[in-house]
Amino acid sequence: MQEPFSPGSTARVELTVTDADTAQAIGSGDVPVLGTPRILALAEAATVAAITRQLPGGATTVGVRIELDHRAATPVGRTVVARARLTEVDGRRLLFAISVTEGGSTVAEGRVERLLVDRQRFIERAGRSS
């Protein structure tokens, strides 16, 4: 059986920063700039978009590990672009390099690890653990 994923898949996701995306609004700080948790969510969205078309039927991926360096503040009104590239496939484990930029500047970069799972089984197990 051929592996559904191969390194090299990419995607990009854009976000124009609003007041709702700020550290103040999401509780990760008290400044009116793009919050780190929102950057993380945007980066994860890019990883999902990079492999969505390759997912086997009934499967999904879940985030299991993140390394993120948030390097620059981004004010409300600016647009950031998150890019993800699948760099490694190890069985069900998928590793992505991610970067978030605004104009020519790097706002954040890091790695995201996702795990391929059976969607229904994952939901059932999550329901039992609560």
Image (cartoon, rainbow, N blue to C red):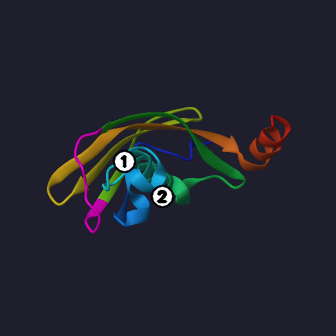
Residue 43: image location, x then y, percent: 41, 50
Neighbour tally class for label 1: few under 14, some 14-19, many 20 plus, Cα within 10 Å: few
Which residue is pictured at 69% across the width and 55% down the height?
57
Residue 6: image location, x then y, percent: 46, 44
Which residue corresponds to mark 2? 49
Which residue of the protein is positioned furthest toward the right in this rendering? 128
Q: In the figure, is residue 77 to the left or right of 60?
A: left
Quadrant where the N terminus is found in the figure? top right
Badge 1 amino acid? Asp
> Mark 1 vs mark 2: which is more N-terminal?
1
Badge 2 amino acid? Ala
Magenta stretch in the rendered image: 70-80
Q: In the figure, is residue 39 to the left or right of 5?
A: left
* Above or below, 13 relative to 67: below
The mark closer to the camera, 1 or 2, is 1
> How far separated are the C-alphas under marks 1 and 2?
31 Å
What secondary structure predominates along the stretch shown in magenta?
loop
Q: Is residue 62 magenta?
A: no
